Image: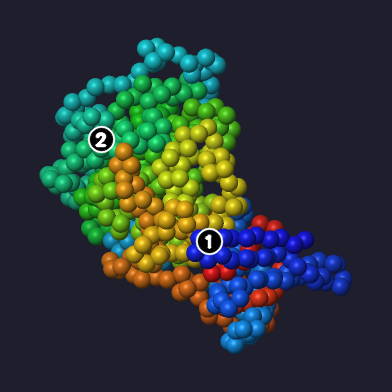
Amino acid sequence: MKKGFIFIESAIILFIFFGCSNPSSNTGGGNITHLDFSVTIPENSNKDVFLIKYNPSYNFVPYNKTGYVENNQRAATDSSDSSNSSDFSSSSYIKTSYDKRINPNIDRLNSEITKTHPLLPKTSANSRNILASETQTTEQTYTEDTKRDFYYFSSENAVTLAEFTCKYVGKHCYVWFYDSNNKLTPESSFKEEKSFKTLAEKFDSICETEQKYFGKHNQDTCYSNIIKGKEKIDIIVTDLEGDAKEGQNSGKFGYFYRVDTFTDINTSNKTLAIYLDSYFYLKFPEECYSTLVHEYNHLLNWINKMLIHEVNNDKQMETWFTEMLSMVAEDMFQDILGIEDINSPKSRLYQHLNGSYIGFKNWADDDSVYYNYANAYAFGAFLARNYGGAELIKKIATSEYINEEAIEKATNKSFEELMRNFAISFLYPSNGEQPYSANSGIFSLHKGDDQANADGIKFSPIDVTKLFENGKPKIFYAQKYISEDKPENTDLQLQNYYTVSLDGGGFSIHYIGKNVTNFRLNVIDMSSDVKYFTYVQ
């Protein structure tokens, strides 16, 4: 069976044909061992040919099941060497050790802690339609210096009850503080731009607009054991997980805890709350402002995706999906909050370039999770800049659907097509100083709008050739990312080493050569989860 795709760019028209033409078979069992690719190169051109492989499934595919290139043939007009080619890989990935190059200052974790009541008992069918005046309210009014007990994670696995003090009352929030680490986070340190007032003002500046695009936090749900009528968000500031120490540069900046929304769990605070680490707020305030957006978005996702639409009661909102939306929200509100790129999720893109094959669907429980964050953000940033900006994100975030289905419904594209275009976007990392236009037909993160909409939101073009390493801009080109290094030995074992594993949601780009007209992809024992296509640039 032969497959064909035509990609048409605005400035260059390219005809690319790919698939299995004249596949050979083993003489014994009849299994396909390779696929022959025929690539049409425009006459008198000088084009690079790439093979892109991607894994839209949730399954991990080891390197020896993703296929490899055996040989290629260049166009007759090209006098360069036509020696055997092979796939590029940064490693034969199984578990990649974390390479700390996101931000030289900090490795920032944000978390939605998902331990919840095992069941969400439904109320009567009419409960969603009750009048606002009849809605049970849990709202309480607080003033500064009010005392109140809150449960919080005093260590990674321990929940502790402590007395917090209301330090500031904002329009949309209360800011609470517990001085659990007197030496490093004394109350006297929270002043000027790092004050509790500033924290409240930053949240107040985004609260209404974030609800407009991601759904309201105060609405009735399908369930009888969920709090109702909460107008203000509690921002709880303390030393999260009790790990503050001088010079600390990694850890949890904040979290949203689903349990707090339940009325029938002992350790629930029975409120809508965002938790923020006190030490990190003093050391890295911009990241904490961004964290407020991120964690508030987890709260909104939980309410608007899982508690309003009872159709999702037997489903799970995947971690990658809610993390993607939360990081895209940070992107949306970056300029409103005055956050520099290096303190925003954009700084994570370095990790994406080093680990796109690790994907985002299978959320790691070790330092590899930083790659998951980077890849999920890159995918969300790509969607926003190529399929409709803030209005697209609103469709994804407020529909009754979750995970892949929410994205497919909002874009009217299949997830496989979106993943193909996502990979292609990294062949167009920049266009010099001029971003690609919206109607260019080119997929790239270097698209967007430098003009804010009526709500002050914009998705600025991202030039991924300029990223951050050791606090300085790093020029990083796609050709270096793809790499032309190839082994001379075409031995099968060596070829296997130069292929790359693909985890769920991951992709890899392989440089085949310049003006290559034919090449062969070995597919011995190749996983059906791996999809592939050629691209000429």
Image check: 181 left or right of 268?
A: left
Residue 493 in the image, given as x and y percentages of width and height: 66, 78
Alpha-carbon distance for marks 1 and 2? 43 Å
x and y, in percent, of residue 77 in the image = 62, 84
Element on which disc 1 rests: loop
Q: Which mark is residue 473?
A: none
Tags 1 and 2 touching, CB below 8 Å: no
Residue 405 percent coordinates (x, y): 57, 41
Q: Which residue is mark 2?
A: 204
Q: Nearer the viewer, residue 173 or 353?
A: 353
Q: Is residue 364 visible?
A: no
Q: Amino acid at mark 2?
A: Asp
Which tag, 1 or 2, sits closer to the chain's start?
A: 1
Q: Which residue is mark 1?
A: 9
Quadrant of the rendered structure where residue 256 is? top left
453 and 235: which is toward the camera:
453
Residue 22 picture quarter: bottom right
> Quadrant of the image for the C terminus?
bottom right
User: 146 left or right of 151?
Assistant: left
Q: Amino acid at mark 1?
A: Glu
Q: Is residue 170 visible?
A: yes
Q: Residue at x 27, y 58 (%)?
A: 248
Residue found 86% across the figure and 73% down from its top:
27
